[in-house]
């Protein structure tokens, strides 16, 4: 993605706003946190409890204006909004009445499908009694909590704003109100995080009857406070991500999920039956348009990626001028690149259905990617069935190698992307593709 030279004019001239998007999703960015986690490499606006600059109120006022303006275009008005995700930052940080204002604006401005999904992401500490009451009786029908761990010692080491006691209280508070569609983010291989502590974390899933959970490998980004503390010896280092110890932590999660009846329906995402994340389905499996609204939001619209930097003041000023804030844009994706993107995204669900690909592009997957499929098949990484191509167990283990085969040749070795501001918040992928293809995948087939 590159700096956008056209400003708000890009919206009118490039995004096809007079055409219907069909099914689509909306992401709402709440770019505030109470504290910055020690390993976080991204800028966030710290929102203090007293909020003396009145950031929250001014931001929500601008956000609602932006929501209404986006919702006025035929692209969204004539389509169907299938899933909404309120994240950040910290989606739950808003005061209850401001959260209600945002949710109401969405339902007033967009044609929300009857079977919609609306996820509120956040921190358990934000859920006051009145917020619990609101969420349980509001259009919000899914809550995602960044629990990370139930080990207080580990949480202190990583500087997490989450607390085990708060997580338990919020989960129980929602359940008591009849709300049980709760998702938990869990992390493994944090400093001081042993496999014994990880097993204790996993056992909490059963006692709390969590419907969906995700696991993330804790990463140390160079230059972050956690990186500095580890180098000074003040915090224990993490284990090598490729070590048997870390792999055993991952396998422990997979094994425990299977024992409890969870299905890993996409990489690192586990759900009880009927509780898959619809937002992920429309974003990854169907590669539908994704409209991001707010500071720090990213979109995929009309074969363009667009981004808005996390500058709250600039965002408020831009919206109040009657403009959309678009600070970064991609080149228009060619049909070939859109197909490659589709393959990489759909494979997050372990397979690519031939009929779905044909419906999306009007051609056959094997005609477009037969050479790559043959190579992967010869290595035992995929299997071809009558109606789809699926990853084998070996393919799942080497999934990054499978996905990277679909990266467009023109992207490999492009070091210019590193010199751009990290609009896409995907540091590891930008660094990886900046290398030559041969470093990761060997010679071209």
Image (spheres, rainbow, N blue to C red):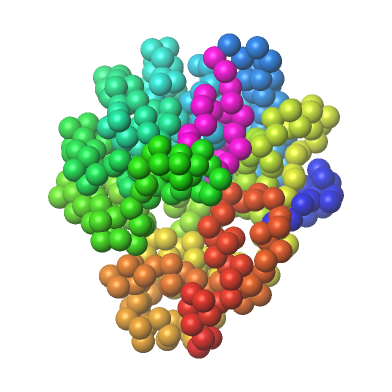
Magenta residue span: 24-49
* Direction left: furthest residue: 259
**Total number of numbered labels?**
0
Q: Is residue 45 magenta?
A: yes
Q: Residue 26: in sight, yes or no?
A: no
Going by the image, does 69 lie left or right of 269? Answer: right
Q: From the viewer's side, name the closer residue of 182 and 5.
A: 5
Q: Is residue 73 magenta?
A: no
Quadrant of res 142: top left
Quarter the N terminus occupies: bottom right
Going by the image, does 55 lie left or right of 432? Answer: right
Question: Could you tell me which residue is drawn at 19 percent across and 43 percent down?
Answer: 196
Going by the image, does 389 lie left or right of 54? Answer: left
Question: Could you tell me which residue is drawn at 75 percent across and 45 percent down?
Answer: 327
In the rendered view, tell whether residue 365 sits above or below residue 147: below
In the rendered view, tell whether residue 136 sits above or below residue 346: above
Question: Could you tell me which residue is drawn at 67 percent across and 28 percent down?
Answer: 63
Going by the image, does 436 lie left or right of 168? Answer: right
Q: Position of residue 164 (x, y in %)?
A: 30, 26
In the rendered view, tell whether residue 438 sits above or below residue 432: below
Q: From the viewer's side, name the closer residue of 64 and 168.
A: 168
Q: Position of residue 361 (x, y in %)?
A: 57, 70
Question: Could you tell me which residue is drawn at 38 percent across and 74 percent down?
Answer: 389
Q: From the viewer's side, name the closer residue of 430 and 351.
A: 430
In the rendered view, tell whether residue 411 sits above or below residue 238: below
Q: Position of residue 152 (x, y in %)?
A: 30, 28
Quadrant of res 102: top right
* Direction front: furthest residue: 232
């Amino acid at each position: 993605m590159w700096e956008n030279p056209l400003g708000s004019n890009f919206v009118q001239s490039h995004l096809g706003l007079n055409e219907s998007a069909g099914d689509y999703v909306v992401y709402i960015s709440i770019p505030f946190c109470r504290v910055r986690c020690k390993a976080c490499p991204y800028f966030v606006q710290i929102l203090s409890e007293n909020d003396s600059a009145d950031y929250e109120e001014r931001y929500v006022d601008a956000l609602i204006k932006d929501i209404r303006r986006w919702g006025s275009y035929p692209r969204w008005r004539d389509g169907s909004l299938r899933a909404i995700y309120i994240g950040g930052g910290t989606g739950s940080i808003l005061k209850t009445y401001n959260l209600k204002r945002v949710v109401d604006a969405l339902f007033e401005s967009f044609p929300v499908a009857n079977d919609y999904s609306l996820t509120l992401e956040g921190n358990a500490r934000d859920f006051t009694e009145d917020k619990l009451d609101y969420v349980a009786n509001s259009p919000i029908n899914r809550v995602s909590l960044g629990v990370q761990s139930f080990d207080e010692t580990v949480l202190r080491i990583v500087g997490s704003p989450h607390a085990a006691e708060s997580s338990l209280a919020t989960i129980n508070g929602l359940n008591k109100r009849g709300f049980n569609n709760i998702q938990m983010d869990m992390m493994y291989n944090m400093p001081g995080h042993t496999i014994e502590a990880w097993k204790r974390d996993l056992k909490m899933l059963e006692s709390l009857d969590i419907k969906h959970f995700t696991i993330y490998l804790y990463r140390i980004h160079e230059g972050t406070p956690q990186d500095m503390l580890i180098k000074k010896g003040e915090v224990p280092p993490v284990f090598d991500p490729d070590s048997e110890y870390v792999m055993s932590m991952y396998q422990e999660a997979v094994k425990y999920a299977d024992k409890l009846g969870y299905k890993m329906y996409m990489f690192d995402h586990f759900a009880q039956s009927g509780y898959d994340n619809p937002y992920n389905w429309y974003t990854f499996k169907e590669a539908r348009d994704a409209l991001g609204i707010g500071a720090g939001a990213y979109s995929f619209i009309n074969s363009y990626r667009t981004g808005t930097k996390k500058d709250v003041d600039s965002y408020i000023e831009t919206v109040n001028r009657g403009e959309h804030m678009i600070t970064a844009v991609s080149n228009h994706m060619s049909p070939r690149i859109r197909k490659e993107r589709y393959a990489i995204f759909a494979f997050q669900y372990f397979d690519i259905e031939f009929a779905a690909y044909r419906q999306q592009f009007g051609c056959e997957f094997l005609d477009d990617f037969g050479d790559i499929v043959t190579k992967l098949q010869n290595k035992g990484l995929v299997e071809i069935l009558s109606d789809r191509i699926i990853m084998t167990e070996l393919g799942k283990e080497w999934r990054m190698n499978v996905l990277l085969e679909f990266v467009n040749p023109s992207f490999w070795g492009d070091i210019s992307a590193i010199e751009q501001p990290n609009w896409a918040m995907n540091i590891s992928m930008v660094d990886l593709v900046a290398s030559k293809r041969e470093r990761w995948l060997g010679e071209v087939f």
